[in-house]
Amino acid sequence: MVSVSNTPALRWQVWVDWAGAGVWGADDVDISDDVLGLRWRAGRRGLPAPEFAPPATLELTLRNLDHRYTPSNAGGPLGQNVQPGREIRLRAGWLGDDFITNRAAPVDLHGRAAPHGAVRWEVAGTAGGFSLRDGAAYGVIGRGRPSDAVALLDTGDPLATLTVGYRRVSNGLGGFALRCAARNDCLRLRFTSAATRLERVSGRAVTLLATGDALDASVWYDLEIEQPDGGVRVYATNQQAAGVVRKEILAAGSIAGAPASGRHGLWRGFRNTVDRWGDFSVGRSLFSGRITAIRPDYAAGKCRITAADALRRLESVRLYRALSGGPMRAGDVAAAILGWAGLAPADYALDGGRMLLTGGPRSVWDVPASRALRRVQQEEHGLIYADGLGRIRLEAASARAAVRSHNAPATLARFSIADNSDSAGPYAAALRWNDGAASVEKRAIFSYRRPADKGRQPVWSLAEPLAVAAQGEARILATADGWDVIQDVATPVANTDYQATNNADGTGADATGWITVAPLAEAQSGVSGRGLMLRVRNSGRQTAYLHRLRLYAAHSWELGDAATHRAAAPDTGDDAPAGVVRCRYADNYAAAQGAAESRLAERSRQRPQLAVTLPLSAAANRRAAAEGRVSDVVEVQAAAQGIAGAWLLEGMEVSAGAGGAGQARWWLTGV
């Protein structure tokens, strides 16, 4: 980790879409100036580390002297828009430059000090530089030969994530310079009317590395430019219209020979005075979710807001669906569950996983979507996270096995944590240690059951009379509790499958002819699997009472006898309790065997765990808190505690005040 001693305090930026319109540059969306304190949490947190990751959460304390954030204050600036369910976003970083000037006349960017005063802009180019006015930078028309100009800040980190405003008006004559060893030795990100282009500039040679989606002309975008080692990713949010929110518009990896400089900044082509750049910062987005509660404190003039990411929503979405059966991998099962729960493919990133489902169909019936995902996690022996930005991620067990089989895992460390504040990198103020003994497993038992099709069967009958008003309609949820899945339900036939009269006690005139019963398709009812929705209509002029109704299905699937797969660790002399996983989706020996062996490879070895406290008073700690990600590899050197080696980052928590002071906590598992 590169030490940057002059890094200013973290700046916390919070946006809330109070109007629900999806326009993130609208008035009153940015509430950063009213944030008095915050707490952000993501990943698997605690000692010992839990098996499942809870939803990422955000808690804010806001200044509310004018009661603008009070839901009942209809006459306030935000009116009726202050309510739970609104989208909320959090970003952490330190300001490079907001490009605001105190004079009406343009100000030259060259030599301008960054807000913390320790770093100055350097403008290089033979065709003029950059001027500032009204919170934006723009190009100065050059007087020399056609050339380029770059404006650079030395962030001290070649892998820094940049956040910046940008408005494209030219056709490819504006963008950004990344990792600039020299003006003609850098990566260049530029924007044409047809594409976003990432290029390698070396001397006079320009090599195209990757292309991505174009930005609309004359529209302000908020861009987030990630620079992982060997790659670049660009995310865009349209500030003036709904629809484009942190959309990945370019992804490039394996860039050979990329410069290693920590200097990044603006780039413009000769005579480009029309593009604009705004609010240049180093940092990244941490959270995207929805507000779950708003609690004003009238006496203190404050308001507390809590929010959670997509995993919270999955807790409340109950599934009534059926998987089709046949060969399916873990990622396919998870994708089906997420799709049923209302998440679009852009909202999750799933690996394929191992083969789980190979037999007949089975239901995902009357269960929260989050619990169904956890079943997939158990059978896959992978890990399911929400990354804090609302994206669900299924991480295969093989992902961590690859890290642990690395010849020198410490060389993979993104951060190096010491227990000494004199360290050049991040340091820990406190370390809590758990030896991991309670998590060791020596045996694993996977229990699964094969479904069998019993053919045509009666699957449901009406339990009590049903009254249907004249010319009216009623709907019945018919749950076939005796069967795992039913398919091809026959439409009930009058006088054979159902009967009705015009009297509640079953006497009176026959009204069966007034009644029609039809099973609804899943698209109409949202119900499938162990049951379905029935629509009952009465075409008569009196109330009809349905006294008998039976359903038959052409295919009725029933779980057969349980089968088990037992696996034991090589040093099986220990009688530790066996880990038992009751499979819901796997029904084959190979899937159970692979999962059991993968689970034991992970859990038969005692892996210590750490809780690390990082004070945000140090520049390197602030950078680590902003840039750390779940599954990063961290090196820990704590001589006083006898702790060393490489660790996997499982979960994070940051508590901070408006000025950026506070602390971060990381939960780590030994590689």
Image (cartoon, helix red, strand yellow):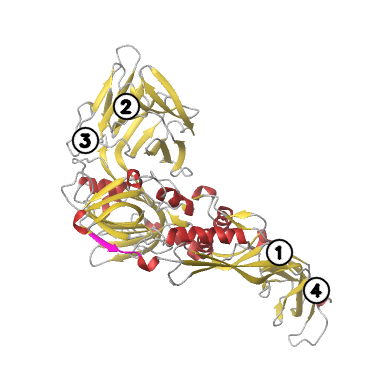
The numbered mark, 3 or 2, whose residue comes first in the sequence reads 3
Q: Quadrant of residue 227?
A: top left
Location of mark 3 (residue): 114
Distance CA(mark 1)–CA(mark 2): 60 Å
Distance CA(mark 4)–CA(mark 1): 19 Å
Q: Residue furthest top?
A: 145
Q: Is residue 516 above or below residue 397?
A: below
- Indicate the amino acid at tag 2: Tyr
| Badge 3 density bin: few <14, some 14–19, many ≥20, Cα 10 Å | some
Location of mark 2 (residue): 138
Distance CA(mark 4)–CA(mark 2): 76 Å
Mark 1 or 2: in front is 1
Q: Label 3, secondary structure: give it.
A: loop
| Number of the label disc, if any, that sits on residue 514 | 4
Mark 4 or 1: in front is 1
Q: Position of residue 441 (x, y in %)?
A: 44, 66
Q: Report the span colored magenta.
A: 431-436
The numbered mark, 4 or 1, whose residue comes first in the sequence reads 4
- Indicate the amino acid at tag 3: Ala
Q: Label 1, secondary structure: give it.
A: loop
The numbered mark, 1 or 2, whose residue comes first in the sequence reads 2
